[in-house]
């Protein structure tokens, strides 16, 4: 079972690197939002520092949602998804492998870009570590939750428009506590409680999201 999941993980990583636009577009979108915000709000450093956590996290959330539509769609279109359903390995484990591969190309990349975004928005260096940690925990949770929406809409012609509508209410707690962790660090307050909550959200998503996404994929394939 683990070998099958690893093969799916490796295949998705390889396809992602070959189709660089799939993961580059969300990163470019993220940087564009970060660079345009000072022009739209205010170039004042103190004002930008105050809003930086929320701005970066909203941009990260939108970038993750932008990238999630293609998670299962190409496999659905070329018949690979049907083959995954027929393998003896549990489908939730294969879904988890696909989400992890996708997160390595989007969520981790967003976390690596976060220090640059923080500098552009005048965040002090002491806050950047908390920002990166919140993104590493939060973006994986966002990817797992978004996988449910991507699975539910995989058979629809323009299902990508529905993914944010379906999953956005579930993203709000992650957005709130991730932004609060950055704000607490900026104010010199403890952040361990916020990071612990993000970790709890991640554990819950790891346990439930692959099961829900797998059930949605079975419905999508059986309905075609």
Image: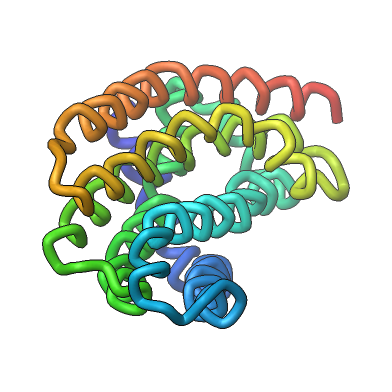
Q: With respect to residue 5, does 129 lie above or below?
A: below
Q: Is residue 187 visible?
A: yes
Q: Is residue 20 visible?
A: no
Q: Number of labelled discs?
A: 0
Camera-nearest residue between 146 and 114:
114
Q: Quadrant of the N terminus?
A: top left
Left or right, 7 with reference to 59: left
- Where residue 95 sits: x, y (%)? 48, 33
- Where residue 106 sits: x, y (%)? 43, 59
Left or right, 172 with reference to 113: right
Locate residue 199: give its quadrant.
Answer: top left
Left or right, 189 with reference to 204: left
Q: Which residue is painted at 28% across and 76% down in the image?
A: 119
Camera-nearest residue between 8 and 189:
189
Q: Quadrant of the C terminus?
A: top right
Left or right, 191 with reference to 151: left
Indicate the colouring scheme.
rainbow
Q: Which residue is painted at 62% across and 18% down in the image?
A: 215
- Where residue 158 sits: x, y (%)? 85, 49
Q: Which residue is painted at 71% across and 31% down in the image?
A: 166
- Where residue 44 sits: x, y (%)? 42, 78
């Amino acid at each position: 079972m683990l070998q099958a999941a690893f093969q799916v993980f490796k295949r998705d990583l390889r396809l992602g690197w070959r189709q660089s636009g799939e993961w580059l577009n969300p990163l470019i979108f993220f940087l564009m939002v970060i660079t345009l915000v000072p022009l739209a709000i205010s170039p004042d450093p103190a004002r930008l520092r105050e809003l930086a956590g929320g701005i970066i996290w909203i941009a990260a959330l939108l970038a993750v949602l932008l990238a999630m539509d293609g998670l299962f769609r190409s496999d659905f279109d070329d018949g690979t998804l049907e083959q995954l359903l027929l393998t003896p390995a549990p489908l939730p484990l294969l879904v988890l492998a696909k989400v992890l591969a996708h997160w390595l190309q989007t969520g981790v990349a967003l976390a690596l870009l976060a220090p640059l975004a923080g500098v552009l928005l005048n965040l002090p260096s002491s806050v950047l570590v908390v920002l990166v940690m919140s993104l590493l925990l939060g973006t994986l949770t966002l990817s797992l939750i978004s996988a449910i929406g991507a699975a539910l809409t995989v058979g629809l012609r323009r299902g990508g428009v529905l993914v944010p509508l379906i999953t956005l209410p579930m993203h709000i707690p992650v957005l709130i506590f991730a932004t609060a962790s950055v704000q607490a660090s900026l104010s010199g307050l403890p952040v361990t409680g916020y990071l612990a909550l993000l970790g709890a959200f991640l554990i819950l998503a790891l346990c439930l999201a692959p099961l829900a996404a797998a059930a949605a994929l079975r419905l999508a394939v059986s309905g075609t």
